[in-house]
Image: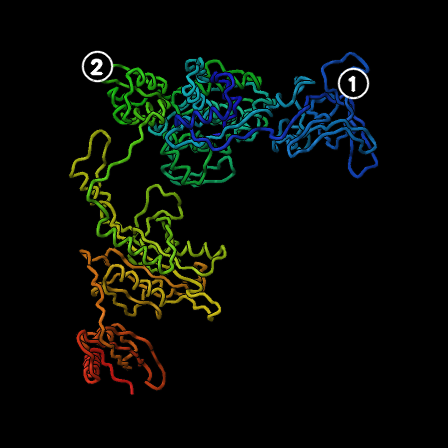
Amino acid sequence: MHVPYSWLQDYVALPDGTTAFAVADKLTQTGGGKLETIERVGEGLTGPLVVGRVAAIEELTGFKKPIRHCQVVVTADAEGPGSAADPQLIVCGARNFAVGDHVVVALPGAVLPGDFRIAARKTYSRDSNGMICSARELGMGDAVLDSKAADGIIVLSADSPVGADAIAYLGLDDEVIEFEVTPDRGYTLSLRGIAREAATGFDVPFQDPAALAVPEPGANGHPVVVEDPAGCDVFVARTVTGIDPQAPSPLWMQRRLQMSGMRPISLIVDITNYVMLELGQPIHAYDRSRLSGPIVVRRAAAGEVLETLDGVKRQLEATDLLIVDDSGPIGLAGVMGGASTEIHDGSTEVVVEAAHFEATSVAKTARRHKLFSEASKRFERGTDPGTAAAAAQRVVDLLVELAGGTALEGGVTVVGQVVRPAAITIAWTYPGRVAGVDYTRQEVERRLVEVGCDLTPSGDADLVVTPPSWRPDLRDPSDLAEEVIRLEGFDRLPSTLPKAAAGTGYTHEQRIRRRVGTALASAGYSEVIAYPFIGQADLDALGLPENDPRRNTVVLANPISEEQPSMRTTLLPGLLAALRRNVGRGSADLALFEQGLVFRPRKDAAAMAPRLTVERRPTDAELASLDAALPVQPRRVAVVLSGLREPAGWWGAGRPAGWQDAVQAARIIADACRVELEVTQDQHEPWHPGRCARLAVNGRLVGHAGELHPRVVAELGLPPRTAAMELELDRMIPAEEVLTQAPSISAMPVATQDVALVVDAAVAEHEVEAALREGAGTLLESVRLFDVYTGERIGEGRKSLAFALRFRAADRTLTAEEASAARDSAVALAGTRTGAVLRS
């Protein structure tokens, strides 16, 4: 919300010397708004800058472009030749002004934004003692202050005072405070709301701009029918006739709109925007001559189409709340009007609409049509239904004053009535108990009254509090307590530290999860935290088949992005997106990992979850039903790799990351969990069918690793041969902590025996290794695969696996016969189980 400081001062009598920074600081302290920036209008502009009147124009010829030598009166003093009223001679190339027009003149000594200094000089063979200025040159942007100023200098109205200080006249000495508005404080999206907060913060009077006398409904009001009172509980319509369609918006209004971040368009539209900024009530104006029959508020019917003011024809849905007349839809309620009844250059009669629409309905419609407007931004945060009639009256007053219009006698229509939020019973001691501060009853009551609440005592300890119509967010005692606490000042709250219960620490699962993260980080992986949202396009890019369980997702009712409306069922989309972004920014060699939850929906979850209220604490049975309806949320860990795994240097060429590194990452995790990992070949999307490993623990599938399928790599724009691993960490964690046995150090020498075994290509290495371990007996210290060979020498469909076996006894030196016997026993069992034979 952009708040011009001079506009704010119209409604609140701030103490003398109060600066814009002081106001922003006070509102930040009380929670009334969070300061974003403070912008000084006309930064770098210094005078003399005055209003001048063009007295004469001499057209100069003989130059590449038309040049004019102007005589401009820059003072109101007119006592004759030689006086201060003598006109200034100024050379100017603009052609959008004429003799008699009032313009803005920068005299010698002035400095314009950008350190552009004005001095007397001779140019085009003429003396020039200043400059006639455009809006852009004064740092006012490209706004059009008058129809004649569309492509040139500023032309002011004829009643602008010649000789007056133009800096003050144009509001170029103002400041604009930008506040961040939280979603539950929609009333601060208006000058009225910000001024109320400032008046409370400084304890000064507040002048409510909505305190207007409003006439009663009359017989000549435009007919209005509300068929959906749940979507629109208040609708006010006013009729104004005799409007001058050529009347320009006054300078002060255009400048305030500009500083508030809105572009001046035409007088009628500018008035509706001005009142919206002033009171927080969105206004829509219809050209009365284009309306056909009564205005009706209803839900859309199947097949209806509306062309909105932005020129887009929109297919409507049954949940869209519409404004219609006999011709059909003429507006999306609370979002945007229709093109068929819009105000145009010849509009002389208007019907002014000021209504209160249900916040959720407006929010859903705006998101469905991707149509976000200043009106929808306010309606979806909650507007004040009690302001609708006053806002309509304010628009009528400005149309009469500025456009020469006439309020139609009896032209007032009011449908519905304002319903204030429900009364709340609160103990006056409750805010103090929440904050840990001893507030007095007088302090509590004063702060609630300042918020706008009506108080009724109920016994000695309780208050019955009725919130104001502009605070729909005040629903329970805790909301009221927050208002008291923030207005009394958060600096009054004592600083305390929570006390941790003795003897507690990380759980078994937490210790292992931290151990896994530390192990991967130690191996050179960088941790990322991705958004937990995905869309069907993400799953399509992974090449998942239609019946893949990972396509069964939990769909959010109100997603942040329509492209990613579901909770993730795999960590890979987020990790691969992070990989792609980093590669795009010049990081070629990457190893990333993430630990996080995935979400799997339960059947009939919606039917199991009860609807709860805030009036009481849920029962144990209701909490159990909610827990049962939650999606299953297993914890997973995944890694992705691309580029070089080992860098190049003086020691030689680098080694690119491959599927082996993805499998090794799984082994690192298994070691951290202290479980034995089983690795076999498999086919599973999105991995390459020939370079995919199945990961299991005690025969139970825990995940997959390998090189991604080339189609997936191409679809996602990833580096060639990107590798990935994903496994379910919850299945890797043993039921209880596995104590690590410290290795024994033997003084006896080791005996090494190497064996090369030939097996079928389909036999997994870990099966052969397991057989060797078991067959070798207790003398075996370690077994390591150090070579894999395939070729003509061993036959097609076969492979040779070379293992190094280390034998050692704790109490003696092994003889060659003992080591050979243990090796032969290991080979024999491997042959029985896997068909392995010694390679000759």
Image location of residue 188, percent across then percent down: 42, 26
Q: Is residue 798 visible?
A: yes
Image location of residue 94, percent across then percent down: 73, 32
Mark nearer the N terminus (2 vs 1): 1
User: In the image, is 277 to the left or to the right of 449?
Assistant: right
Depth check, front residue: 676 or 521: 521
Classed neighbour count for the residue bearing mark 2: other residues with Cα under 10 Å, few (<14), some (14–19), many (≥20): few
Image location of residue 286, percent across then percent down: 50, 26
Determine contact: label 2, label 1, CB under 8 Å: no
The residue positioned 52% from the left and 21% from the top of the image is 7
- Which residue is disc 1 drawn over? 86
Q: Which mark is residue 460?
A: 2
Q: Residue furthest bottom?
A: 840
The residue positioned 39% from the left and 35% from the top of the image is 363
The residue positioned 82% from the left and 15% from the top of the image is 81
Q: Is residue 785 above or below residue 240?
A: below
Depth check, front residue: 610 or 295: 610
Q: Quadrant of residue 448?
A: top left
The residue positioned 34% from the left and 26% from the top of the image is 472
Q: Quadrant of residue 455?
A: top left
